[in-house]
Amino acid sequence: MRIENPWWSEMPSQTDQMYRDMRPRAYFEPLAELVEAVDVRRAVVLMGPRRVGKTVLLQHIIQKLLDKGIPARSIAYLSLDQPLYSNLSIEELAGKVLGASLLEKAVPVFLFLDEIQYLRDWERHLKAFVDVHPHIKCVVSGSAAAALRLKSIESGAGRFTDFFLPPLTFYEYLDLQEINVPIELKKDMWTLEEGFIETLNEHFIRYIQIGGYPEIVFSETIQQDMGRYVRSDIIDKVLLRDLPSLYGIQDIQELNSLFMSLAWNTAQEVSLDKLSQNSGVTKPTLKRYLEYLEAAFLIKTVHRIDQNAKRFKRVNFFKVYLTNPSIHCALFGSSTNQEPSGALIETAVFAQLFHLKDQVLHYARWKGGEVDMVFLNERGHPDGCLEVKWSDNNIEQWQKRGPLRIFLKKHPNMHACSFTTRTKTGQFDIGNQKMMYLPTSLYCYLVGLRLAPDFSL
């Protein structure tokens, strides 16, 4: 325990140098606010896929608490993937790492439990622990994110606050490398410094190839064999260990085959009928597998609406996206000079958006038309729509015709209607509405900036 908590013995009290040398992710401050809210009697449940930096984020928050003067012995961290802790309850773990005196004192104490999924019935024990020890702020993390979320909603109502850490956004990919992007607001539109768009596009293509996971970004060695790293440390551990242990899956090869097929066809529309015919797997089993893959945040399904923004009663067709385009590049290869496909460009845009909580993503398709992404509000009405392109051709045609214009005319109360380009920025007036266009790379960067301090889109 002392090895995991070096601040107990070091002077001054601090986390390991390795963590202090790492630049914090953009999610650091929002999560720190939840942790520091000691008056709120809720545990914080940090969720996210493997290798996105959850442990590093916890260590950064611990260092912030130490810097604010929280006593070193009032902060404890345990990684529960060690067999030594597997049969202990949270109450027993807290007693060992904090001691009886801190368990009972009415002073702020912080308990960090990493890899919580290895603790049996963790959600039930955590809820009871929060009720009994309101002065102890519990922060737990785990990789089987959606499974954790489901359990926290069922068992921790009013006691847990969920916080999701996704793979790197494009903004974070640049920020972690301290790459400055010169933007300014002109006539209500964000624009780049003249001539910088080609540089930003080069970074964007590289982000698509390697940019989802911090460890890959900073390791040239891993980049040389990224496929092996992603398969062994992310994909295989999820498909061969996490999901079978959580859900009792018997036919792992069947699940793996489905995932590889969906990964190859990211951003494409699929149907349960065709998936079942091609794989020989029954539709009920396919539905479960899709839920499992979403539970590990490897994929995300997006439902279809029509041009009136109405859901179909029979949910047979839907889109499936990888949660980060670099997974596709790692699995199927991508050379440094290779131009990304339209599907990977769309997947990269989706990767910036799917974890935002204020809107629900759909896509619209009807006879003769399709819109890549539609943002529905909590009332089920479209707030905005987006068509993803990686080209500057035929921009003027969007003002006169096309599915995006049709959808905009159908829903005049939308706040935003946009399409992306390769390098061009501008807008059209369509009646009393505006249709905006901007480079795909700039759009992705601006979405990520919503998480940065002192910035609002």
Image (cartoon, rainbow, N blue to C red):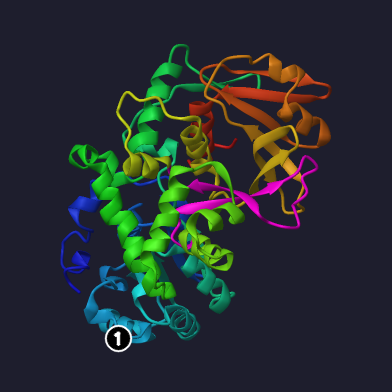
Packing grade of label 1 (10 A; few <14, some 14-19, many >=20) is: few
Is residue 295 shown left or right of residue 420? left
Span shown in magenta: 295-324
Q: Quadrant of residue 168?
A: top left
Counting from the top left corner in percent of width and height, residue 151 is at 51, 74
Image height of 71 relative to 197, above or below? below
Question: Relative to residue 308, is residue 175 drawn left or right?
Answer: left
Q: Where is 440 relative to 424, above or below?
A: below
Disc 1 secondary structure class:
loop
Q: Is residue 189 visible?
A: no
Q: Residue 314 lies in magenta, yes or no?
A: yes
As rendered, which of 433 and 349 lies closer to the eye? 349
Q: Position of residue 188 (x, y in %)?
A: 65, 23
Q: Which residue is mark 1?
A: 87
Query: In which quadrant will I find the C terminus?
Result: top right
The image shows residue 359, relative to residue 336, as above or below, that is below
Q: Residue at x 57, y 52 (%)?
A: 274
Q: Amino acid at mark 1?
A: Asn
The residue shown at (68%, 47%) is: 304
Q: Nearer the viewer, residue 448 or 348?
A: 348
Residue nearest the observer in this picture, 368 or 103 = 368
**Quadrant housing the N terminus:** bottom left
Q: Does residue 113 appear left or right of residue 9 in this picture?
A: right
Does the magenta segment cover residue 179? no
Q: Which residue occupies 31% across, 86% down? A: 88
Which image quadrant is residue 437 in? top right
Tell me where residue 256 appears, x and y as whole percent.
39, 58
Report the side of 270 relative to 215 (left or right).
right
Can residue 395 be seen here? The reply is yes
Q: Nearest the camera: 88 or 29?
A: 88
Q: Position of residue 83 (x, y in %)?
A: 23, 78
